[in-house]
Every structure is written in C-alpha cells, then in structure tokens.
Image: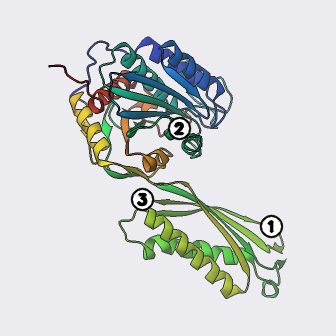
Amino acid sequence: MTSFRPKNRAQPQPDMLALRRDFHQHPELGFQEEHTKAKIAQYLRALGLEVHEGAGVVGVLKAGSGNRAIGLRADMDALPIHEASPHDYVSRHSGVMHACGHDGHMAMLLGAAEKLTLNPEFDGTVVFIFQPNEEHGLGACAMIDEGVLERFPIDEIYAIHNLPGAPLGQVSTRVGQICASESLFEIAIYGQGGHASMPHVGVDAITVGAEMVTALQMIVSRKLTPAAGAVVSVTEFLTDGQRNVLPGKAVLKGDVRACLPEDRINIERFMRQIVTGIAAAHGITVEMSFKAEFIETINAPGPTDAVARVGRALNLETVPDRTPMSFSEDFAHFCAAVPGCFLLLGNGENGAYGRPLHSSDYDFNDALLPIGSALWVELVRDRLPSRKIH
C-alpha cells in the first residue's frame, strides 16, 4: 500500500482537529443536536457559504457557471453510551458518546468546505448536508420530507463512514447493495393463562412463542437462497407469567437484516404465514407488526466508479468491490432518491482505532481527518471539473 502524503499538510488542519474534539466532547443524541448544528452553521457562515438550518444544516458553495450539483453528507448524532476512554477530550455529557465517528465525519466535511472555499477549482455547486439522527434511521427522511432535495437539487450524493479495523485511509466501496436493511418486528401472542400444575386447561403462551421462535429460523435456512445473507433474530421474549402462573400473553420482538428488497419483502410474508399458522394450530389469536427502519443502501455505478478513481489518484489503497456490510445506514434514503455512493474509509487497525463501532472505548482516528478531507475535495473536482479556456 502506498501511504497518503498530503501535498501541503502532513498533519490534520488545526481547525479540523479542534472541531472534531469539540464535537466529541459535546455529543448529542438524534434530533437533539443543537450545539452541533450551531457550531456547523457558524463555521460555514464564517467561510462565506449560503447556510440553511432545519432538521439538519445545509451549506451551499457555487463556483463557475456549471449547472451540475453534487451533495456530500455527514451525520451528526451520538449514541447513548457511557464513554470509557483514557484520552483528554472525553465526552462531557454523561451517558452520551460519539462512538461511531460522526464527530470525525463532520470535521472532515467542514475541512473540505474550507479547502474548496479557499481554492474553488471546480465548476458547479456543492451542497454540504449535515444530517441528524442517523442512528435511528430517521434523519435522512426528516430532511427529505422537509424538502432538502427540492430546495437544493443535486445530481449525485456521497457519504463517508469510517471503518475500524481497516488500514488507515483504505477506501472501500462497491456498486449495488453495500449496506443491509433493518426491519423491526413485534409479535403479540394471546393464549390462555392458568395454573402451572394444570397446563392442559389453558394455552401456554410461552410454549407457543417458543415454537414460533424455532420456526422463524427456518426462513433463512430453508426459504431463502443460501447466498441471501439475511438474518432473522428474536431479541426479546416477554410474558406476564409468574412463579406458578402460566402466561396468557407473550410478546416476541426482533430484528431482520436483508441485502435485497425482495428478500425483505419475502421474509415478512413468510413470517406472517408462520405466525398465523402456529396460532391457528393452537386456537389462539396473534398480532404482528413489521417495519423497515432502514432500507437497503444501493450504490449507483457512476458515483461509485468515481470514488474508486479518486481513491487511486490520491494513492490510497482502494477496494472497489468490497463485501457488503451487514450494518444499516439511513443514507439509503438519499441513494433511493438520487444516484449516490456510500464509501468506507479505514480508521486504523490498532488500539482504540480498531475497536468496533458503538463500543465504549472506540475513538475516531485524527490521522484520518486530512485524508477524508482531501478525498472530498478531489471527488468534487472530479465530478465538477473546471472548464478550461482555450
């Protein structure tokens, strides 16, 4: 791997580093990002950008006379996690932490905005999108519902997410599905409670629920192709039973991951067949809900090819056909509306930089700041090339 060497600076820009650590010290949960939004808006205005505030923050930078526009998105929200890190810029908000690197994502995009403002070597419009509440899959929809894509029309959209455990600065992405969907389900079972010594008198909701849990696992192993990569997980089993009381009601809750929309749709259909069939066999009633919190993230060919091209041009290790990720990302809603590319950027392999996302001792790697910022800048110049005058 050829190491990345910034042309002008070998260290993170002071502003980017200060911003990242300020964001880290003041994490805010989804739709509560008031300090974060104010900081971003202030910074963009100081650069002279057109700034709009709503559910998120949007900055607009125009150069030349081109009519093409691209969007660059960074997520803003933190997680309800108590930080367990030794560094001197730990979270000042107890029980809230930037454990997914959104602090770094914001700083990289602000750094790119600064570079592009000072050296606007492109022709067209860049829309910097700072999105709230990514972790619950609600922020992208909130901005879209608010009219962000109508108010700021863009031809393409991009997002970077750091990837712990991958070599520092490694660029990886793929055409097609890159992140899975996440759907949450809930199944309410209405049996007949009774005395633990006389189970034959009623219908034990635990027994029926256990039968459903086992049967649901047959969907992935017997109803879908082995290459589907889907997961059906029952994560909660709640009842109203007591020490010697058989429960009359049970609730199953869980999580479904799918790589393709058709698999997600089929899984829901199979689940409903299984649940209603087992309930009918026991002569009881059942209610089921199934909601796709995150849809599948699908990368478009043109934007994805551009990311790989820019990664190679910056001498970054580039993987253009990585394996799809099992996690979900609400950037998917932007990609469903506009051709886009979601890419991963290696956070490093050692220490806190290699800790899993959402872990209490994870930390964003500050050495990634100039790399991510440069990637954004070169991507803009690639997609909005300056017109040459002959």
Q: What residue sits 58% from the left and 36% below the top?
A: 132
Q: Nearer the viewer, mark 2 or mark 1?
A: 2
Q: Residue furthest left?
A: 390
Element assignment for label 1: loop
Cα–Cα gap, marks 3 and 1: 36 Å
Q: Which mark is residue 148?
A: 2
Residue assigned mark 1:
240
Residue at the image position 73 percent from the left and 75 percent from the top: 205
Mark 3 lies on residue: 259
Image: 192 above or below 18:
below
Q: Position of residue 376 (x, y in %)?
A: 35, 28
Display coloring: rainbow
CB-based contact (under 8 Å), mark 3 and mark 1:
no
Q: Of the residues under marks 2 and 3, which one precedes in the sequence?
A: 2
Q: Position of residue 146 (x, y in %)?
A: 59, 40
- Kindly check if marks 2 and 1 are in contact, taking CB atoms under 8 A apart as contact: no
Residue name at image x 60 percent, y 71 percent: 213
Instruction: Please state which of residues 173 and 67 is positioned toward the viewer in this rendering.
Output: 67
Q: State whether residue 274 is above or below residue 129.
A: below
